[in-house]
Amino acid sequence: KLYQQGYEAGFVFRYIAEKNFGIEAGLNLSQCGWKDDYGYQAEDYYQRSMLFAEVPFLLHAYLESGKARFFLNAGPKFGYFISEEEFYNNEELAFYYPYYNKPTETYFQWGIMGGAGFEFHLGKIVCGLSGSYYYGLSDFFSNRVTDPFVMSSIQQISGNFFILFQAQ
């Protein structure tokens, strides 16, 4: 399996309550999914792309030096499934892989997110880069003992460029 590249866009609200600590919440649209690479026949493939509306609620801790800040974020992220698309070119493989043509069964997703980054404060504008990892604690397919899946949670690695506008 190969992780699929996708997009993420949204809005962030950050509130700094104490020196070096605050909270950060957001509303994002995020695309994720995977592509099966069968190896033995390069022309056969399966790809699933899923779109989620997400709300991360994170602790924001930072160290600053002049106009630059290094930060760490950690906390829960909640998501709601919006849509999905499947692409494949070999109907016979659906017999071997039970997720072909199987719709998402659990729309609400949640998990743990953590990340790090740096930013520069240029007056009322903040520009930065960050990276994060999300580990889903819920599954989008059923995973009872009789089901073919042991686990179907989402894992994401993200890299972001951002611009924030300060209210003060």
Image (cartoon, rainbow, N blue to C red):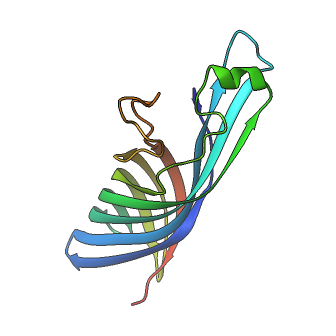
Which quarter of the rendering shows the C terminus? bottom left
Q: How many marks?
A: 0
Residue 46 at x, y = what percent? 70, 30
Rendered image quadrant of residue 72: bottom left
**Residue 42, image x and y in percent?**
77, 16
Quarter of the image that includes the N terminus: top right
Q: Is residue 165 left or right of residue 14?
A: right
The location of residue 81, given as percent across then percent down, is: 53, 58
Q: Residue furthest top?
A: 40
Q: Residue at x 59, y 42 (%)?
A: 33
The one of 117 and 153 positioned closer to us in this rendering: 153
Horizontally, residue 48 falls left or right of residue 152, namely right
The answer to which image quadrant residue 143 occupies is top left
Q: Position of residue 69 (x, y in %)?
A: 35, 63
Note whether 78 is above or below 140 in the view shown. Answer: below
Left or right of 52? Residue 93 is: right
Note whether 118 is above or below 55 in the view shown: above
